[in-house]
């Protein structure tokens, strides 16, 4: 098994290699669509956290369903791909602008990354 930092380095390198994007689904994950109402729950959850989100279409789809979406991803290339694929501008949040750190929240359309 890889150590945590090795996983981080692996995924950053994987996203940097444009030939290795075949693992990204072109559409919304079918089980997510099928079971969305169960995910939202009886109390009508209003936010969701998607760890290791990559450039998943699921982020934008969940936002279109009315959820506040936060994706967590170690690769800036993945954020850029997500923003470009959906026609969103990638912008620093107010917190990121103050700290000038890529490890703090950015915005891409309706989603925080």
Image (cartoon, rainbow, N blue to C red):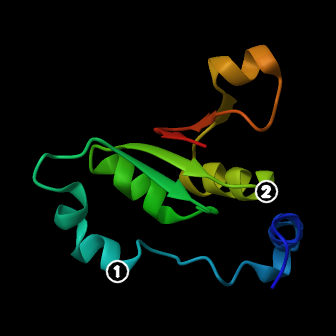
Q: Position of residue 15 (x, y in %)?
A: 80, 68
How many marks can you see? Answer: 2
Q: Is residue 1 left or right of residue 108?
A: right
Please give the name of the residue rendered at 24% of the width and 46% of the height, measured from the top-left corner: 45
Q: Where does label 2 land, which residue?
A: 77
Q: Position of residue 32 (x, y in %)?
A: 33, 72
- Identify the mark at residue 9; answer none if there is no mark: none
Q: Is residue 97 left or right of residue 53?
A: right
Q: Quadrant of the N terminus?
A: bottom right
The quarter of the picture where residue 75 lies is: bottom right
Please give the name of the residue rendered at 41% of the width and 76% of the height, measured from the top-left corner: 29
Q: Quadrant of the C terminus?
A: top right
Q: Position of residue 102 (x, y in %)?
A: 80, 36
Task: Compare residues 42 and 68 and report the one nearer the observer.
Answer: 42
Please give the name of the residue rendered at 34% of the width and 80% of the height, measured from the top-left corner: 30
Q: Residue furthest top?
A: 98
The numbered mark, 2 or 1, whose residue comes first in the sequence reads: 1
* Image height of 5 relative to 34, above or below: above
Q: Is residue 25 left or right of residue 92?
A: left
Q: Where does label 1 land, which residue?
A: 30
Q: CA distance from mark 2 to mark 1?
A: 25 Å
Query: Are discs 2 and 1 less than 8 Å apart at CB?
Result: no
Please give the name of the residue rendered at 83% of the width and 23% of the height, measured from the top-left corner: 100
Which element carries disc 2, helix, strand or loop?
helix
Q: Is residue 42 left or right of residue 21?
A: left
Query: Crowding near pointer 1: few (<14 within 10 Å), some, many (20+)?
Result: few
Q: Position of residue 76 (x, y in %)?
A: 78, 51
Which element carries disc 1, helix, strand or loop?
helix
The quarter of the picture where residue 24 lies is: bottom right
């Amino acid at each position: 098994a890889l150590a945590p930092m090795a996983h981080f380095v692996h995924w950053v390198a994987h996203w940097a290699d444009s030939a290795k994007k075949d693992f990204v689904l072109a559409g919304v994950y079918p089980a997510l669509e099928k079971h969305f109402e169960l995910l939202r729950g009886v109390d009508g959850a209003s936010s969701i956290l998607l760890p290791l989100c990559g450039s998943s279409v699921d982020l934008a789809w969940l936002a279109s369903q009315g959820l506040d979406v936060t994706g967590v991803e170690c690769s800036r290339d993945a954020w850029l791909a997500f923003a470009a694929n959906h026609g969103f501008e990638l912008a620093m949040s107010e917190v990121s602008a103050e700290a000038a750190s890529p490890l703090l929240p950015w915005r891409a359309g309706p989603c925080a990354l």
